[in-house]
Each structure stands twice: as C-alpha cells, then as structure tokens.
Amino acid sequence: MPKIIEGAREKILVNARKRLFEKGYQHLSLREVAKESGIATGTIYNYFANKDYLIANIMLEDWEKAVQKMDKRVAAAASVKEGVLGICKSIEEFSAIYACIWNQPSVAAAATPD
C-alpha cells in the first residue's frame, strides 16, 4: 500500500497549477512538480494516474469555483434572463482561464474522448 503524505495532494495541485500557467501543458514536468512539492516523482502517481489526470483535477477545482459563482449569480438574479447571463459569465470566466492552455497544439494532440 502506498505511503500517504499529509498535504501532498494539495501541494502537488498548487505547484502543478503554477507550472502549468508559467510553462504551459507541454513543458509541465511531473519531476519538477514533485521536486517543488518536496516529494519523490513516483509519489505523484499515488494521487494522480498521469499528467492529464493531474491537470484535469486542477481544472475541476476551478470548475467547482465557477459553479459556486453560477449559484450565487442565479440566486442574486432579478430575472431568469439575468440568471442565465450570470451562468454564461461564469462559463466565460472559466474558459478564459484555460484558453491559453487549450490553444496549445500539444493539448489538442493529447486529448482523448475520456
């Protein structure tokens, strides 16, 4: 059974997010993320199956924040139209965060139907 290190998952996510936006998808190195997180490279695989799964978890955290914004905007909306516009704005904000990543050729090549 793999050894679980307290706070390692969160450190990995924080450091991977930083590197993803600094260097881009293609140059995100799990080895560098591990070093910055103070763990062995293999330890990352105790938490994330591969680089794509790690990035998907980063994106999921941001998507969950976007959904929370949607909920607040819908709750504060004075009309259905305003609520729908609030949802659209949250989706647009989420998309803007990742546009620079999604537009990299290596990301499209790595994409799978999953």
Image (spheres, helix red, strand yellow):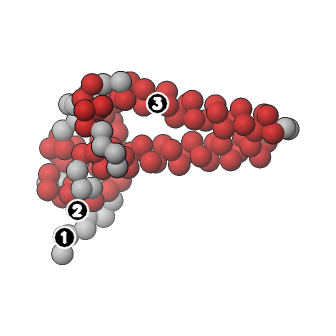
Residue at coordinates 30% horizontally, 25% vertically from top-left?
Answer: 104
Res. 89 visible in picture: yes
Q: Which mark is residue 86?
A: none
Looking at the image, is mark 2 or mark 1 earlier in the sequence? Answer: 1
Q: Amino acid at mark 1?
A: Pro
Q: Which residue is mark 1?
A: 2
Query: At 57% across and 42% down in the image, what residue appears?
Result: 66
Residue situated furthest front in the rendering? 113
| Separation of marks 3 and 1 at Cα, in angstroms | 34 Å
Q: Is residue 109 above or below residue 67?
A: above
Q: Residue furthest bottom?
A: 1
> First in sequence: mark 3 or mark 1?
1
Amino acid identity at mark 3: Ile
Where does the image place residue 97, in percent across and percent down from the top left? 46, 30
* Residue at 22%, 62% in the rendered image: 46
Q: Is residue 104 above or below residue 112?
A: above
Q: In the rendering, which numbered label is found on residue 46? A: 2
Image spot of residue 29 (x, y percent)? 18, 38
- Residue 97, numbered circle: 3
